[in-house]
Every structure is written in structure tokens, then in C-alpha cells.
Amino acid sequence: MRRLAAGNWKMNGSTASLGEIRSLLADHPDPGCEMLICPPATLLAPMAALAAGTALSLGGQDCHQNTSGAHTGDVSAAMLKDAGAGYVILGHSERRADHGETDQLVAQKALAAREAGLVAVICLGETGGERDAGRTLDVVGAQLAGSVPDGASAANTVIAYEPVWAIGTGRIPTLEQIAEVHDFIARALNARFGSAAGAIRILYGGSVKPSNAGEIFAVPHVHGALVGGASLKAADFGAIVSALAAF
Ligand code: PGA
């Protein structure tokens, strides 16, 4: 299994930010793990020009569930692919919160992504209130059941466990808590998809930094990270890539 360091730039970045990608590629020409950056859609094409022939993969942050049509402001999976993406993040908690995305919609988008030849990075995670109420595994299990469509395999799916309360807060779960949820996800994937699930990568996301990446990557069933804030600077993201490559 090739481990995956994924950066989610969210609604950040302009053409001036392409310098960070140049630095990342200069410092990590042969990173020893898979490197993925998911910039805003406006930057996919210029970033793809820089990434051509390098070890850097690119992805979108969302796609529409339909292939084309009258959906003002939306982007289809095929458009992302055409602009240079190989991946698309789906069901991020910010999309679920800001745009009311349901598990059912996320599953439809994942099928659209698969149809277009993109790998879906499907995000799951409990809120702070749900964790405090002892409902973490119920919530993550329900999201997994509802958001991941049938036929998922390592070739078309990555799972990202992102506790909502850890995103952008500087707080992370204990390593035991991360281990518990990742083990739970691995078992759930195995129960549903059998041997096809064996190589589906499970990323941890939420306040991953150079300073905590190593200990998180040592947790069983953690196959990489989905990184927000720390992915915006090549030095920080590069340090996380190096920490992952050490495993
Ligand atoms: P963060 O975001 O690393 O800034 O906490 C992670 C994410 O939302 O994917």
C-alpha cells in the first residue's frame, strides 16, 4: 500500500501560491509516499502544468453528482479530470455543514467521481458533541455505510477520518482514540467489501502538523493524512510528507 499525504487548500490560494508547489517539488522530487494537493478548482490547470511528470497528484475539493448541465457554479468530476485531477475530496465536514450535504448525496458524488476516473477521498467524522455523547463509532459507521457506494475498492476510494472538532482547532484526538476509529473503519470496510477493502487507504485529518505527524502515522491503520492549514506552506507540508515517507 502506498501511503498518501494529501493537502486540502480549501478556499485559499491564487496564482501567487504556485510558488509553494514549485518549492514542494524542488524539495521532494522523490517523496517516498504519494503526494496529493487539492487546490481550489481555479488553480487545478496551472498546478497540473507544474506537476506534469512529477510525483505530485492533484485533486478537486468537491464535484457535482451529474456529469453536465444547468448547475450554475458547480463543477463536474469530468471537468476536474480534464483540468488535471486524479482525486476529489467528497463529503468534507465543511461541505456537509455549509451546503447541507447528506450521506446519500456524497455517495452519488462518489459514483460520479468513479465514472470519471477519479479516486474519491470520502470524509467521515464526528462532532465534538457526538464524541462527548459517546456516539463516535455510531456516527462514523453510519456515514461510512451511507457515503461510500457499493463497489468501493482501493482503486477508486480513500477514506479520511476527520473529527470535526479537530479541524482547524489545533486539537487532536488521543492516539488511542485515533487507533480506535481507524480500526473500526478498517473492520467496517472489510465486512462490507471483503478482500477489495484490504488496500483502501484510511487517512487521518484534523490539525495535522509537522510536530504531530510522526506519532499519528505510527498508529495502526493510519495510512496517511488529509492536511488543511499546514498544507498551504511547502515547508510544513514537505515536513509531513517526510514524516510519512519514514514509515
Ligand atoms: P486542518 O484541516 O488540517 O486545517 O485541521 C483538515 C481538513 O479539514 O481537511
Image (cartoon, rainbow, N blue to C red):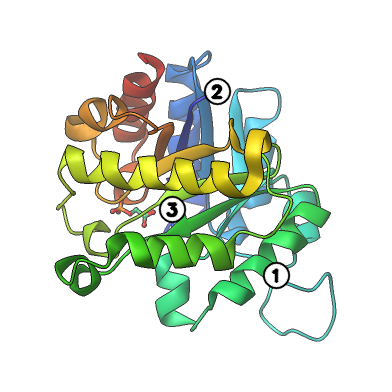
Q: Quadrant of ligand 1?
A: bottom left
Give the quarter of the figure containing the C terminus. Answer: top left
Residue under label 2: 2
Q: Is mark 3 within 8 Å of ligand 1?
A: no
Q: Secondary structure at mark 1?
A: helix
- Left or right, 45 with respect to 210, comes to right
Residue in front for this viewpoint, 50 or 226: 226
Task: Check disc 3 and give the amino acid type.
Answer: Trp
Q: Which mark is residue 9?
A: 3
**First along the sequence among labels 2 and 1:** 2
The residue that appears at 75% across and 66% down in the rendered structure is: 76
Above or below for 7 versus 140 = above
Q: Quadrant of residue 214?
A: top left
Q: Which mark is residue 66?
A: none
Task: Check disc 2 and give the amino acid type.
Answer: Arg
- Left or right, 212 with respect to 243, comes to left
Above or below for 214 versus 208 = above
- Left or right, 167 with respect to 93, comes to left
Instruction: Give the x, y percent position of residue 153.
Output: 68, 41
**First along the sequence among labels 3 and 2:** 2
Q: Residues within 10 Å of mark 3 (few under 14, many from 20)?
A: many
